[in-house]
Image (spheres, rainbow, N blue to C red):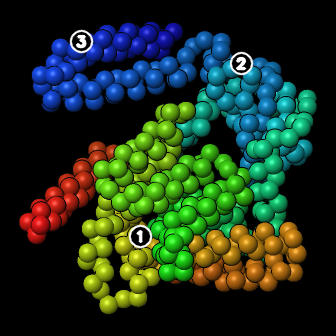
Amino acid sequence: MADFLIYDIATQKTLWIMFGLLFLILVFWRKDKIVKIMTLCSLGLLLGLLYFQFLRQKPFPEYISYYNNQTITLQGVVAEEPIHSGQKTKLVIQINGIKGKVLVNTSLFPTYNFGDILRIRGKLEEPPVFDEFNYRNYLKASGIYSIINKPQIEKVETIRGFSLKKSLFDIKNHLEEALNKILPEPEASLANGLLFGERTNLPNDLIEAFIAAGIIHIIALSGYNISIISKNLSILFNYLMPRFAFYLPLAAIWLFVIMVGAKASIVRAALFGSMYLIAKKIGRRRDMSRALLLTACLMALPSPLILKYASGFQLSFLATASLLYLAPILENRVLQWQLPPWAKEAIIATTSAQLFVLPLLILNFKRISAVAPVANVLILPIIPYAMFFVFIASLFSLLYFPLGQFLGWFAFLFLRYIIFVAKFTSKIPGSYWEVKKTNILIGFIYWLILIIVVYKFNSLKGKQKNGSA
C-alpha cells in the first residue's frame, strides 16, 4: 500500500505542477522566449512522468504483480514465441483482463506454441536480482513482472483460424530448421544469431570470445547492426543502381523483418535502420534530429521502460545517432587516407558507432575491449554479405535442398571467418580489461563531451560555409 500512496502523491504533485506550468505559458507566451521554451520542455517532461505513473504496476487485483508470492491457478495465452534453452523452455503468458505478463520456466516437453491457451498452476514470484545482472529490470522492459518455475500446465486450446504473427513465427522456425540442416555447429548457431538475434545455443567459449573482441552486438540484431547494414546496402546499391539506392535497401530491410518473424526487438531495430536511410535522403540536420527523436518517442510510447532497461533499444538509438552526427565528422579525415573505399566506409561507420555506444557496452558487459576497433573493422563490412547468404541459403533450402546446401557453403565461409577473427583477436594479450565498478554518471559525462565536440565541429563548419559564401 505504501507504493500506492507514493504513486498517488506523486501523481497529484505532477498534476499541480502541470497546472502551474500551463499558467506560466498563458502569462508569458508572448513576452519571454526563454521562459516559453523552458516551460514547454518542463511540461513535456512532466507529461512523460505522468504517463509512466499510469503504466507502472500498482497493488490492485488487475495487476499481475499483486499476486506475487502466492500459489495460484491462472489461464492465459502464449503471447510470444517460446524460447528453448538447454533443457528448459521459456513461455511468456498474457492473462486476459490482467495488466502485465508472466514468464513461465518449464521443461522442453511437452512442447507449446505461440497462441496456445494454457491453464497454469504454480507459485508466482517476483523476478530475482543477481549480483552481476538485474534480471527483474531486464524483464520489466518486456512488460513481465512475475515468473513461475516448474508449474503444472494443461493445454486448454490451440489457436484457430489465421494468425499473421503465428504465420510469421512459422516461417522463422522453418528458416531456423533449414540452417541447422545445412550448416555445422557452431556456424549454425552463429547464423541463427545473425539472422534472428538469438544466442541461446552458442557455445559459452564463443560468446566469451565475442565479448572480449567487442563484437557481441552482431548477434543482438539491434539497430546497431541494422544501421550498419543500411549504410552498407546504401553504398552497394549506390554503385550498382544509383536511382534505387534509397528504395531497395529500405525494401530489403522490411522484407527481412517479415521473413524472420517481425519480433518487437527486430521491428525496433528496423525502424532505426529505416530512419537512418530516410534521414540521409532528407539531408537536413534539423529534420534528421526530429525524425530520430520522433522514432524513439513512438517506440517508447507502448512501453516507456525500454528507455531505461532495453539495451537493444539504447544501442539502436545511439548507433543511429552516431551515423548521423559523428560519422560526417570522421569522413573529412578518413576519406583522405589511401585505402580502398569499402575500408574507409567500414572505419567511419564502426568507429563512430563504437565511440557512441562505448559506455553502454561497458555497463552491460563490464569489459573494455582494446581490440574492438580492429575486430569491428574486420568483421562489420562483411556482416551484410554473411546475412545475405545465410538468408538465401535457408530460404532456397526450403524450395530445393541441394541448392540451399550449395549456397550454404558461401554462408559457411563468411561465418567461419567471423569466428576466426573473434577467437584470434580475443586471444591477443591485453585484448580486454575487466571493469569491476561502473557508474552511469561517467557515461553521461562521456556523452556530454561527445555532444560538445559534435556541436563545436558543426558550428565551426557552419561559420566556414557562411564565410566562403
Residue on which disc 2 sits: 97
Q: Tag 2's secondary structure? A: loop
User: Which badge, 1 or 3, comes first in the chain's sequence?
Assistant: 3
Label of residue 23 in the image? 3
Q: Tag 1's secondary structure? A: helix
Q: Quadrant of residue 114?
A: top right
Q: Residue farthest to the bottom? A: 338
Q: Residue sitting at 31 percent across and 63 percent down?
A: 326
CA gap between label 1 and label 3 equals: 48 Å
Q: Residue sitting at 39 percent across and 57 percent down?
A: 282
What kind of residue is marked 3? Phe
Labels 1 and 2 touching (C-beta < 8 A): no
Percent position of residue 142, x then y: 59, 38
Residue on which disc 1 sits: 350
CA gap between label 1 and label 2 equals: 46 Å
Dot in front, 1 or 3:
3
Label of residue 192 in the image? none
Residue 205 is left or right of residue 92, and the answer is left
Percent position of residue 127, x then y: 60, 33
